[in-house]
Amino acid sequence: MYIVFITPAAALRRFPIYRLASRFYGHSNAITGPLILGGILKKAGHTVEVYEELNGRLPLEKCLKKADLFCIYTMTSTAPRAYELADIIHACSDARVIIGGIHASALPEEAAGHADQVIAGEGESVILDVAEGRLTDRIIRTEPPQDLDALPLPDYSILKTPCECANIMTTRGCTCRCTFCTTSRMFAPYRQRSVESVLDEIRTYKTMGFRYINFEDDNFTADKERAKEICRRMIAEDLVFKETFFFGRTDMAEDAELLTLLEKAHLNRVLIGIESLNEEALDEIHKGQRREDIIRAAEACRKYKIRLIASIVLGIDADSRDDIRKAVQFAKDLDAYQLQPAVLTPYPGTPVWRQFQEEGRMLVPNWEQYDMMNVTFQPKNMSAWELQNEFYHAVKSFYDLPSSFRIGKIFGAGYTVRRLGLAFFSHIGAFGAQFAADHAPGTHYYKLKQGIYEKEKTLICGSEEASPSIRSRSGSSPAPQPVSSHVLRSESALLHQTSRSGTHSSL
């Protein structure tokens, strides 16, 4: 069979200018799930191609002429595009469509309105049987694999879109239970690969010539002794890359040996969830950290030359506008290398999702807006548009000219250029949103500013009265259009697609 995997991107993210902007945020990379599953199918003798729409054009017309099977990955914000592609494929060819990924795993019945089959969960154990027709159920719910070492590595030879940076998942799941996070719930239990398995993958990418890698675990330093051993082996075997990104938590600052090894192994770019400086807000989201932990972590990153990407969550019930602005200024004062302001997003299956449903605070019926950059619910302490404005105020105030040159003095001239690029695109994005809010009826921003969502009071999740923008193959409306840890693949606020979801191996 000729099999095509597609990781869709929303319309905005397929624009060339957006792809250009994303290059200032980080290096192009690919979600690992399709590369693992595609590799399994390739090994079985099938011809496989993988496309990431975020990084390059999908030659859909060419694929329609030769593909027997399309496998489409979903995050919540890309679900409308995934369904659109599935419907086009069914209309224009006899190819089958399988849909999987984090969104389809949360709402498989919705995805089944557009697919021949849906894989809910991690797909390694079933992908071959589904592709070759031995498993025929419309929705296939999988059990998480326990022995991660037995799984194949991602196969980058089948990737047909640009990729500068290899992604590595050394664990699946998360040890924490933040109320807004999908990963800790949908990919439980927390599982680790052996250090030797991880080193085998790192060696592979070094041999392939990659200069950049990302550790896409929700918390690479959750097991500090294991993280130290990986770093020691990387140093000892000269498996150090120009830049290595990872997700961490503030507690990494408690271990000087760990920080030293991270520095020597060039794990020199970390995203830490500050989320808020308001301790009531931190308790509300079950973050498990205090203000002093955040300060200590930021000081440690500066001391050990680890560039800090500070993530804050906008819209926590306990936070006011002043709390949000204090958090942004705090990140700036600490010389955070980048800021990831993430609008609180109620993803299916999370406590935040259930809470907002029960309280009738869901506003936006279009899944495409559920990307951590757009407000989709009624905040507690301000209007929806006021919270949206806080997102743009955050990026404009953080990415300004003086801080760009200050960052350059700390990290080098190249980072001044990157920061200036982020400043330019942040200000352009904010201007575009404001213009749409004032002059473009029908757009998300216009509806937010004019209070149209509040007036309509569209209750999207679990309501039969919702009005989704995508229709199923039969022409009837599918389940309502609702949301995506990280993951992100990024996976995210600003331009980071892998934050807090999306690099696991469901389809």
Image: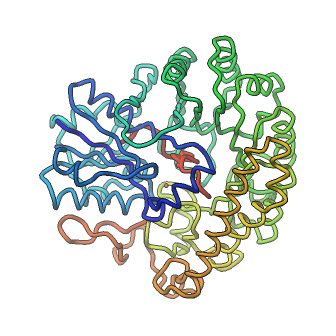
Res 239 seen here: yes
Horizontal side, residue 85 vs residue 236: left or right = left
- Image quarter in which the C terminus is found: top left
Horizontal side, residue 34 vs residue 283: left or right = left
Q: Tag count in the figure?
A: 0
Residue 138 in the image, given as x and y percentages of width and height: 21, 49
Residue 400 sits above or below residue 406 on the image? below
User: Residue drawn 71% across and 56% down?
Assistant: 312
Horizontal side, residue 421 vs residue 263: left or right = left
Relative to the observer, which residue lies in front, 32 or 321?
A: 32
User: Residue drawn 16% across and 43% down?
Assistant: 68
Residue 20 in the image, given as x and y percentages of width and height: 55, 55
User: Residue drawn 18% across and 57% down?
Assistant: 90
Residue 122 in the image, given as x and y percentages of width and height: 39, 37
Res 483 seen here: no
Horizontal side, residue 56 vs residue 375: left or right = left
Relative to the observer, which residue lies in front, 413 or 452?
A: 413
Task: Quadrant for residue 421, please give it.
Answer: bottom right
Residue 166 sits above or below residue 440 on the image? above
- Image quarter in which the N terminus is found: top left
Residue 258 in the image, given as x and y percentages of width and height: 77, 25
